[in-house]
Image (tube, rainbow, N blue to C red):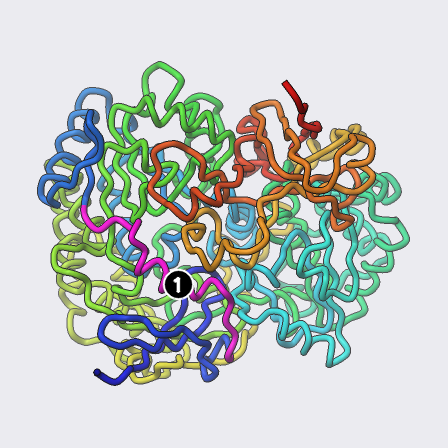
């Protein structure tokens, strides 16, 4: 028997980016353990990492293209699959126009090196305005605020958690997530270190989350009212004359307009609306002003609500006005080896066009995914007739999933790049499965830009892909070539991009980006050729950019450093990195000031009797890890948390099956009586609902649960950003009738 070998790898499942040591022999994974020498995770690992073995070995994972026929699914060749995609999509575009074809990209895209480097070319080849992604059910308010205030959609500040003394967390659960837009593996240990040096961790959330359990203080807040808490905090800062801009003072504009807008609100009314006592708001404002190393961090719970856009903007403003933006121990900007603010041609844009049916604005060429179903179902010119999905399951992850089910069933053509026959891909006419994650190389191009320390880590493939299998980027590259425009310079550019992607591969492209980054080594090989090619302005800009911190970084450097390369702690980057026209932080963008009127109208609105919020678990990651037995075993997790007072009023016993009903739908789910949620709030986890007919995920089907998105209203969006309102849905909870 051959001896076992060790493979060092960064986990590609979630944003924590933990370093792993995989022991294997003869193509079999023997163990997955934490890498104690990893430069970021420092020996931390969570249960999700073990799912890499389960995904790789999963008998339900698709290994070849499937075509849906009248008699069921049949395996076909890659050539036949690509031919059919080209033929069917071309026919629909010729007959109905290019916007009759839509694209949806899911969350796993950002965890995939090859996909990140090639999905943009694929989107350009399809040439549709109907582009959707998981962004608008997740982090879109961060991106819109960063674009408006700092000039670039990806210039998003992250907590300097390892040096702060006061960490205020609003609507986030980093103990369970490992950080979100904050790569902070082993977050609990980082908080222990914070507390050991005399610091405090405060969690503001409607639920006593896993993060709240380790916090120094849990402040319950009514769902959807974060905007009022933040306005009250800013009101206290302004009215007390405690504004501190520190080194940013010469580089900030709009403070007077912001002050006037905030002082129009009264603290007492704001406190009453959010449910946090006015005296605690005042003392928290003082804490933020008095502590030199402090920060306010907001995440999914703050984003996915009626005023998510305003909330994230106000969080950024609060950090700036208390002297905690771009300062050690505050909210800072990572400077990764591959910097998306340099590598992406678009800084972002807002409202260049709007959705056909509801008129919601685009951001960065993407439309809100809450509109996808209606754009398929509503007749008329521009109706979506074909859909291309990549690494996504919108039936379970976007609002009003049952309506989207109906919409997808009526498409003229649908193709999915996905390894599973799941709740979404069951509607596809073709499924194109990529190779296993362990059969591809890995580098966190996107997520390294949000890590709490600047690091660079590369993982080669653990296994060779089987004969006949294709990587995600190979599938995308072929579709890019086939779906590119048919004549002229567009076609020529598509061919050039396809040639470069094929010639360089993900590793060659990564090497180019590392060498042209802030820490890079000189790049010689293709400089003149790449700089001369048409349609490649981003490459030309990269090649011309100076190395700010030369470290000789290249792919070869990373190959020789299996535990990663430590590039140092977060550093002040403003005003150097600002991309606004006047090179100043915009505290009072007009769109945000205008939207405050909407918040003012809602200030005295009566609250629904009962509202629904979501939750996550350390063993789950959206909808795609439930086919791992080791992650779903044990006590059922798809339960509805109900406060004891609410349960008593409705005659609901612990463990009883109840009906959860909203305007758009109803599900039946076991109740779990718990004081971890506020009265008037019920809580259901995200990503379940594997009871749809026609899926091929045996383990997930046995632990089906229900989908929270079957009761989330697709018509409720944050009108400023287009983000779906996933938290604060008015609902009823009824005891299920028994007997005949």
Q: Residue at x 39, y 79 (%)?
A: 564
Q: Quadrant of the N terminus?
A: bottom left
**Image location of residue 518, percent across then percent down:** 39, 74
Q: Is residue 313 above or below residue 332?
A: above
Residue drawn at the location 46% of the way across and 56% of the way down: 154
Q: Is residue 102 left or right of residue 716?
A: left
Residue numbers of the magenta segment: 42-64
Q: Residue furthest top?
A: 380
**148 or 276: nearer the eye?**
276
Does 633 sit left or right of 540 as displayed? right
Helix, strand or loop under label 1: loop
- Rendered view: 564 above or below 393: below
Residue 259 in view here: no
The location of residue 333, given as percent across then percent down, is 53, 66
Q: Quadrant of the C terminus?
A: top right
Q: Residue at x 42, y 33 (%)?
A: 692
Residue 670 can be seen in this image: yes
In the picture provided, is 122 more to the left or to the right than 656? left
Could you say which is closer to the camera, residue 251 or residue 480? Answer: 480
Residue 53 colored magenta? yes
Residue placed under numbered mark 1 in the picture: 12
Residue 9's spot in the image, x, y percent? 36, 73
Mark 1 neighbour density, 10 Å: few (under 14) some (14–19) many (20 or more)? many
């Amino acid at each position: 028997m051959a001896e076992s070998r060790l493979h060092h790898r960064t986990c590609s499942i979630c944003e924590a980016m933990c370093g792993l040591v995989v022991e294997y022999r003869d193509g079999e994974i023997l163990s997955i353990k934490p890498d104690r020498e990893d430069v970021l995770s420092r020996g931390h690992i969570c249960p999700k990492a073990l799912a890499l073995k389960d995904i790789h070995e999963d008998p339900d994972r698709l290994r070849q293209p499937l075509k849906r026929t009248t008699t069921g699914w049949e395996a076909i060749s890659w050539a036949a699959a690509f031919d059919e995609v080209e033929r069917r999509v071309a026919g629909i575009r010729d007959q109905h126009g290019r916007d009759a074809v839509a694209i949806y990209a899911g969350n796993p895209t950002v965890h995939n090196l090859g996909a990140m480097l090639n999905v943009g070319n694929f989107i350009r080849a399809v040439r549709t305005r109907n582009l959707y992604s998981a962004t608008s059910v997740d982090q879109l308010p961060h991106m819109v605020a960063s674009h408006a205030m700092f000039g670039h959609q990806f210039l998003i500040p992250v907590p300097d958690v390892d040096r702060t003394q006061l960490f205020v967390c609003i609507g986030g659960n980093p103990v369970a997530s490992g950080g979100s837009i904050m790569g902070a593996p082993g977050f609990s240990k980082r908080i222990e270190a914070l507390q050991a040096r005399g610091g405090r961790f405060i969690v503001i959330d409607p639920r006593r989350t896993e993060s709240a359990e380790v916090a120094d203080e849990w402040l319950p807040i009514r769902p959807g009212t974060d905007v009022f808490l933040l306005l009250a905090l800013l009101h206290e800062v302004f009215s007390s004359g405690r504004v501190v801009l520190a080194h940013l003072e010469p580089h900030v504009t709009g403070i007077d307009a912001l002050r006037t807008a905030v002082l129009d609100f009264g603290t007492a009314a704001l406190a009453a609306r959010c449910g946090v006592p006015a005296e605690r708001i005042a003392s928290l404002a003082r804490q933020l002003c008095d502590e030199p190393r402090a920060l306010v961090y907001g995440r999914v719970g703050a984003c996915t609500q009626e005023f998510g856009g305003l909330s994230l903007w106000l969080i950024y403003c609060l950090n700036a006005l208390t002297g905690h933006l771009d300062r050690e121990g505050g909210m800072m900007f990572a400077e990764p080896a591959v910097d998306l603010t340099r590598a992406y041609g678009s800084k972002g844009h807002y409202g260049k066009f709007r959705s056909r049916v509801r008129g919601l604005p685009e951001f960065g060429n993407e439309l809100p995914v809450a509109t996808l179903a209606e754009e398929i179902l509503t007749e008329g010119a521009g109706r979506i007739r074909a859909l291309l999905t990549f690494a996504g399951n919108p039936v379970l992850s976007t609002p009003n999933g049952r309506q989207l089910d109906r919409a997808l069933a009526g498409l003229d053509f649908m193709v999915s790049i996905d390894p599973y026959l799941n709740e979404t891909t069951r509607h596809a006419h073709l499924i194109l499965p990529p190779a296993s994650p362990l059969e591809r190389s890995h580098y966190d191009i996107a997520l390294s830009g949000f890590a709490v320390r600047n690091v660079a880590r590369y993982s080669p493939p653990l296994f060779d892909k089987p004969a006949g299998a294709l990587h995600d980027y190979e599938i995308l590259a072929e579709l890019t070539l086939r779906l590119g425009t048919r004549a002229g310079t567009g076609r020529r550019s598509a061919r050039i991009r396809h040639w470069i992607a094929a010639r360089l591969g993900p590793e060659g492209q990564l090497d180019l980006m590392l060498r042209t980054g802030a820490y890079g080594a000189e790049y010689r090989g293709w400089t003149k050729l790449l700089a001369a090619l048409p349609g490649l302005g981003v490459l030309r800009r990269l090649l011309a950019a100076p190395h700010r911190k030369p470290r000789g970084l290249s792919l070869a450097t990373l190959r020789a450093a299996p535990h990663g390369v430590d590039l140092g702690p977060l550093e002040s980057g403003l005003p150097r990195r600002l991309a606004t026209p006047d090179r100043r932080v915009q505290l009072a963008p007009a769109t945000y000031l205008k939207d405050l009127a909407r918040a003012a109208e809602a200030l005295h609105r009566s609250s629904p009797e009962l509202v629904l919020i979501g939750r996550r678990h350390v063993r789950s990651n959206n909808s795609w890890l439930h086919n791992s037995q080791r992650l779903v075993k044990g006590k059922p997790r798809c339960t509805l948390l109900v406060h004891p007072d609410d349960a008593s009023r409705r005659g609901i016993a612990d463990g009883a099956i109840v009906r959860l009903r909203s305007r758009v739908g109803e599900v039946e789910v076991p109740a779990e009586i718990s004081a971890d949620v506020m009265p008037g709030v019920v809580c259901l986890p995200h990503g379940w609902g594997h009871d749809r007919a026609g899926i091929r995920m045996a383990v997930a089907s046995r632990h089906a649960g229900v989908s929270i998105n079957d009761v989330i209203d697709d018509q409720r969006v944050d009108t400023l950003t287009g983000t779906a309102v996933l938290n604060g849905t008015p609902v009823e909870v009824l005891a299920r009738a028994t007997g005949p």
